[in-house]
Amino acid sequence: MAVMKPASSDWPIGILFSRTGVTGVTGNEHFLGTALAIEEINAQGGVLDRLLAPVVYDPKSDPEEYRRLATRLMTEDDVNVIFGCSTSSSRKAVLPVIERNNGLLWYCSFYEGFEYSPNVIYTGAVLNQNSMQLAAYLLQNKGSRFFLVGSDYIYPRESNRVMRDMVEQHGGEILDEVYLPLSAGPDEVAEVIRDIQAAQPEVVFSTVVGDSARTLYTQYAESGMDPKRVPIASLSMAEEEIRLIGPELCVGHITAATYFNSLDNDSNRRFTALWHSRYGDRPTSTWSETAYNQVHLFARALERTGSLDTAKLVRTAHAVRYDSPEGQLEIDAENNHCLLTPRIGMCNAAGQFDVIWQGSAPVKPDPYLSSFGLAEFWLA
């Protein structure tokens, strides 16, 4: 994706994903999905015969750098619309800047919910679109003794709080709940592996992210623990990180997501073909696909408004639909979050996920868990 100073006739947009630092792998996937959609739209003539002109920065996985660069985009680069942030800590850092300048952030990561801003479109899953279904599946199929491990920031702590409530509410037991620094190294991860072995859980629920997550999966295999018997269940471990770890070490581990590379539909076949023509053998994942989707949702809203005005874009975004690689997408006007279809996959030897359960229809987002409980999500 060519990055240049926008011409006066272009649509300037900001891109703010970390391509380096501890969350560089997943942030780079967000960037590549965003870049692919921009290139595709521009190759077709742009929006209303004007190109999307990205202004791109790398915050290097540092929340303070996110805040500084968001300010730069909005006050120096005259950018009103930003696609960015992979973690909740980065979104929280950027949000005051977005709201103060009445900009619009498109946020594509799944996250813990409990947030609404008129200046944010949330296109990733919230907990009633992934975590609740995962809890039901695990309790029914894997056991009731859970070990929780996460990285030490907002998303893992909130996700584990909700997982604990759901498991205990339905007769399960949380054996332990531990947190690792985002920059945790092999020695710190090894201590957690020893704790898991001592606790003898039936399920390990991991919200560890970044380099530490890949270390966790590698050491789990090296410790001799069998994922087919005691899997690591996650909301974040996806195809690219599986490739980096080695698929042979990950067979049997479980991920809940709204998209998997293996989905069999025309939109996903077109997306993966376009992706491989641009990026080679690198796999698509929920990280790249959600980023790709939201640029197309934005382009459809922009085509209708002909304006980058935040209120107009948000209002129009509520009315657009997009046939994405994961299915039909639309944005709930009540809370600016997407209706999404939950799925659960198990990693296979090819580094893909076999879908072992999926919802029958898109689930309405409930970021505040106002209908808390597993009853309506219990899997037959």
Image (spheres, rainbow, N blue to C red):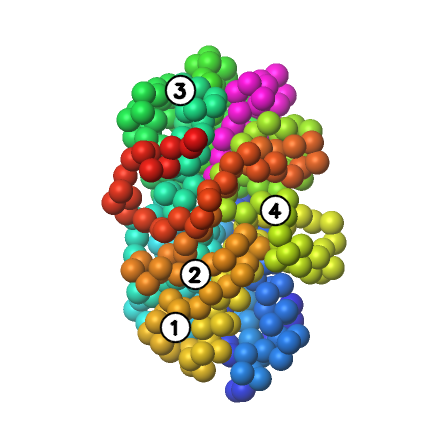
Q: Amino acid at mark 1?
A: Thr
Residue 68, given in percent of the width and then of the height, sits at: 42, 63
**Distance between mark 3 and mark 2 Cα atoms:** 35 Å
Q: Give the labeled residue for mark 4.
A: 263
Residue occupying the point 57% across, 41% down? 238
Left or right, 91 with reference to 193? left
Q: Quadrant of residue 93?
A: bottom left
Labels 3 & 2 near each other (Cβ < 8 A): no
**Distance between mark 1 and mark 4 Cα atoms:** 29 Å
Residue 367, given in percent of the width and then of the height, sits at: 32, 49
Residue 32, given in percent of the width and then of the height, sits at: 61, 58
Which of the two labelled residues, at mark 4 and mark 2, occupies the earlier sequence position? 4
Q: Give the labeled residue for mark 3.
A: 144
In front: label 3 or label 2: 2
Q: Give the labeled residue for mark 2.
A: 330
Residue most extreme to the bottom: 8
Secondary structure found at label 2:
strand
Indicate whether residue 275 is drawn in magenta: no
**Distance between mark 4 and mark 3 Cα atoms:** 29 Å
Range of magenta residues: 212-235
Residue occupying the point 35% across, 54% down? 92
Q: Give the labeled residue for mark 1.
A: 316
* In the rendered image, the vertical position of residue 83 relative to residue 146, given as above or below: below
Residue 42, given in percent of the width and then of the height, sits at: 62, 75
Which class describes the residues within 10 Å of circle 1: few (<14), some (14-19), or many (20+)?
some
Residue occupying the point 47% across, 69% down? 298
Which of the two labelled residues, at mark 1 and mark 4, occupies the earlier sequence position? 4
Q: Amino acid at mark 3?
A: Ser
* In the rendered image, the vertical position of residue 369 relative to residue 68, given as above or below: above
Which class describes the residues within 10 Å of circle 4: few (<14), some (14-19), or many (20+)?
some
Secondary structure found at label 3:
loop
